[in-house]
Image: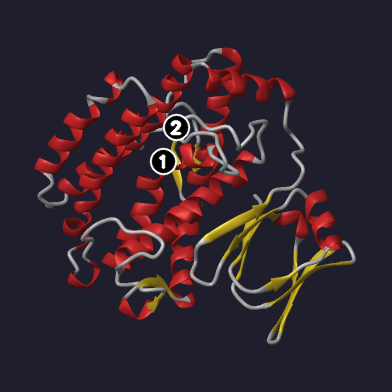
Amino acid sequence: MKKDFYIFNNGELKRKDNTLFFESSDEKKYLPVNEINNIWVFGEVDINKRFLEFASEKEIVLHYFNYYGYYIGSFYPREHLNSGYVILKQAEYYLNTEKRMIIAKKFIEGAVLNILVILRYYRNRGIDLNEDIDVISNLYKAINNATDIEILMAIEGNIRERYYKCFDKIINKPDFEFDKRSKRPPLNKLNALISFGNSLMYTTVLGEIYQTQLDPRIGYLHSTNNRRFTLNLDIAEIFKPVIVDRVIFSLLNKNVITSKDFQRQLNGIILNDNGKKKFISEYNDKLNTKINHPKLDNKVRYKRLIRLELYKLQKHITNDDEYSPFIAGW
């Protein structure tokens, strides 16, 4: 199984012989090039053309984050698996309003049903979430009647607003009150965790798309426009509740992340490097956690589930196999 590598220090990333080498003022490290899927860069890291050529040859995707932890872009090597036929089918389903809506609704259905799984899980552990579950369940019924993407996104927005308000009950820590969703910059610590976790999820999905024949520039829920990538945003909606949000709950309920792991920047609050490292450690543990797959005889890692989700979508647009989103079963 290939791994992801994270760089927080400033330094230089380069090719050395037939492998990769990272050098900083206090660290020198060889990276096993054949074992790496993605490299996540949080520090100020210098690279050159020779390195990029080698990374492209080895099919390694690089994801860049700025000092504040915001995702700024990816080095997405020349597609090695892209199929002209698959890309044409993706475009066909995007341009056909009815076909696009069917897929977009499935993404929202998957996201909302996984949100309800999370809420019922914590309700069964004594947290009063009955009213929230009822409200979200009623909003969920409106998805099928949505006639365009804007209405669908509005329904999803209302559901997430109600869902995020449940975080205070689940976490129950005055220092981590939700208040309201805020981004760029996050205005409180909980929003900083949500934004950082969602960015990790978007880039994780992007790395998995690279291993398929799908083109990440053609999404269905998020409109294909001036954004570089949109399909990863679509698929991430399904997995954010069961991966990102559960990571946040675990980190806070176990007191792994505390107020000391944040700093004020740009009139907002962000995770410091120590907080980012703690989050990434828990996030990777979650991605590598195995669960029983409803249609397979063996257990599957969450990260593998993302790849399987992409394969299901590809079969939907190429073979007319009806796409059904992953719903957590615990």
Residue type for callout 1: Glu
From the top left corner, tell me how far across and down residue 277 is, in percent: 49, 71
Question: In the rendered view, would you say 329 is above or below 173?
Answer: above
Q: Residue furthest bottom?
A: 26
Residue in view at x 60 percent, y 23 percent: 91
Kind of element beneath mark 2? loop
Residue 163 x/y as whole percent: 23, 46
Report the label total: 2
Label 2 crowd (10 A; few <14 / some 14-19 / many >=20): many
Residue 308 relative to residue 36: left or right: left
In the image, farthest residue toward the top: 320
The residue identified by callout 1 is: 237
In the rendered image of this protein, does residue 50 appear above or below residue 300? below
**Label 2–label 1 contact, CB within 8 A:** yes
* Location of residue 238 (image quadrant): top left
Q: Is residue 145 above or below residue 281?
A: above
Helix, strand or loop at mark 1: helix
Which residue is disc 2 drawn over? 221
Outermost residue on the right side: it is 17
Q: Compute the Cα span from label 2 to label 1.
A: 10 Å
Where residue 104 is drawn, which disc sits there?
Answer: none
Q: Which mark's residue is nearer the viewer, 2 or 1?
A: 2
Nearer the observer, 131 or 300: 131
Three-letter code for the amino acid on which mark 2 is drawn: Leu
